[in-house]
Amino acid sequence: MAEIDDVFDRREEARRLAPIFEQRYMAILRFTNAAVKRAFGIDRFRLHDSEVNRYLVNAAQRVVGISATTELEIAEQLRIGQAMGFSNWQIAHGVPEADYPGIDGIYFTKWRGRVDMIARTELQHAQNEASLNRYQATGMVDRVQIVDGDDWDVPCATRNGTIVPLSAHPTLNHPHCTLGLIPVLTEGVA
């Protein structure tokens, strides 16, 4: 009987995703640092530090966590394909005349755009983490204003416009969340 580990390697997926996230995350950090420098005149941030590495490791771990859904879908295709007596090739590539998508069908049809959604969500999370970290590092920001949501997006729309302390550590509510964090200067800072 085919097993999920025969077709899906969590460590390999994390290894392949790490450089993609690192490249984009570093671009986000450069942008955030430039914005802080323009706004506050501070230029003392390091782009390669333990915080950056922590964000990258967390992003890779979350993506592998997302893979639990992938594993269930693959396992279901394996179960159905095996029950129908399909070959390994048919399980991998599908049998259109039997209305069986196979593993390719999951990736190319059902999850079209999923990779973009994961990348956007993880990069948004990393950007917000970096912003909170950098705002706190200035010593001049103690709160953030939350910019989030549309009228239809109830959990996000309810917090849109609110000001919370940095310690509240606002995070994304869902994939595709548009959470943005605007720094609010500590009272008395000009």
Image: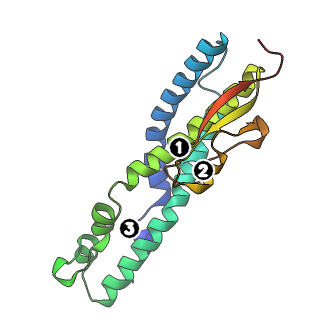
Residue wearing tag 3: 7
Q: Residue visible at 40% across and 72% down? A: 74
Residue 16 pos. (x, y %): 43, 47
Q: Which structural element holds mark 3?
A: loop
Residue 48 lies, with reference to residue 180, above or below; the image says above
Q: Which quadrant of the view contains residue 148? A: top right
157 left or right of 11 in image: right
Q: Judge depth for marks 1 and 3 and give the one in front.
A: 1
Q: Residues within 10 Å of mark 3 (few under 14, many from 20)?
A: few
Say whether residue 56 is visible.
no
Query: Could you give the CA–CA distance between mark 3 and mark 2, rounded to whole angstroms?
Result: 37 Å
> Mark 1 or mark 3, which has the lower sequence index?
3
Placement of the N terminus among the 4 image quadrants: bottom left
Q: Residue visible at 20% across and 78% down? A: 95
103 left or right of 127 in image: left
> Mark 2 or mark 1, which has the lower sequence index?
2
Residue wearing tag 1: 178
- Quick check: marks 3 and 2 in contact, CB under 8 Å? no
Query: Could you give the CA–CA distance between mark 1 and mark 3, rounded to whole angstroms?
Result: 34 Å
Q: Residues within 10 Å of mark 1 (few under 14, many from 20)?
A: some
Q: Residue visible at 64% across and 30% down? A: 182
Residue wearing tag 2: 156
